[in-house]
Image (cartoon, rainbow, N blue to C red):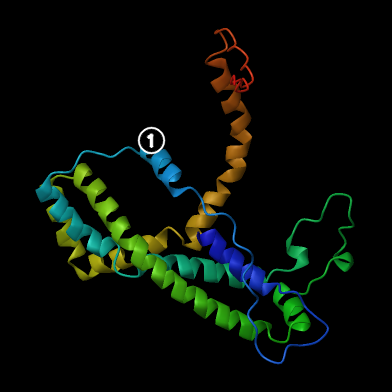
Amino acid sequence: MFATMLGALVATAVPTVTTTAPKSVIIAPATKRSAAPDMAAMVKMFDTLFPPQPDPDPARLALARTTVTTLVPTDSFGKAVGEMLGGMFERVLEMRESDFPAPKGKATSSKARSTETLHQSLVAKDPYFDERMRLTRAAVTKEFIMYSAIIEPQLREGIARSVARRFDERQLADINAFFATPSGKALGNQFLGLWFDPDLMRSMMKAMPAMIVVMPGSMERIAAATAHLPKPPKREPAAKDKTTK
């Protein structure tokens, strides 16, 4: 969903430029919608992957719901995701061709690659680009507020149930006492935003090169764990339905 939002921003950011400038600010028309997913099948799949858990103790659940009102305050989800996508979009616009690895077999000299930012290139082609982006981002922000109203109640209840099963009443009382302090409230207000913070994203990306190095060895060890077993039988092709009339 949020990737779709970012895609909408990018799609609007790279409009089809005609030789005649528009007389007014025009937002690019929406693309043709794809077929709606089978929601019943998706819900059934999630029920299998994440089966319903036992109901928590009512007293602990009540305490956990108090905890969650600090961890996920109203509009915090939409704000956190909106800030992440907005910041990412701004940084994309400031990127240059020279910021990307040169394609294999192509010249890599600085003269062969443009140092013009994407924003500069788009503004040069579309005089309405900045106004188009201002209006689009305002519209996207309103949509995120709507999504927050749908997602946050479910998110709060899910976290509350999980917290109630993992902490006892004494622990939950201590947690809530901390969240009632100014420092606790400040932490709660930033809780969701922390997961979208650039420093956190950078730290996770820094781990990727080391993960790639050790991954082949991991695959070999995983394969070795069952190497002594006979190979599984080849899967037979699905038989065609042969009904008789």
Q: Residue furthest front?
A: 245
Q: Type of residue at label 1?
A: Thr
Helix or strand or loop: what does disc 1 sit on? helix
Q: x, y (%) of residue 244?
A: 59, 19
Q: Is 64 rendered above or below residue 218? A: below
Q: Nearer the viewer, residue 188 or 43?
A: 43
Q: x, y (%) of residue 99?
A: 73, 63
Q: Which residue is drawn at 13% across and 44% down?
A: 57
Q: Which residue is drawn at 63% across and 29% down?
A: 216
> Going by the image, does 119 lie left or right of 180?
right
Q: Is 56 rendered above or below residue 48? A: below
Q: Residue at x 40, y 44 (%)?
A: 43
Q: x, y (%) of residue 138?
A: 51, 80
Task: Say which quadrant the C terminus sits in.
Answer: top right
> Going by the image, does 173 lie left or right of 102?
left
Q: x, y (%) of residue 94?
A: 67, 73
Q: Which residue is drawn at 14% across and 44% down?
A: 168
What residue is shown with label 1? 48
The answer to whether one can see residue 218 in this image is: yes
> Going by the image, does 97 lie left or right of 216?
right
Q: Which residue lies furthest to the bottom in this view?
A: 23
Q: In which quarter of the image is residue 219?
A: top right
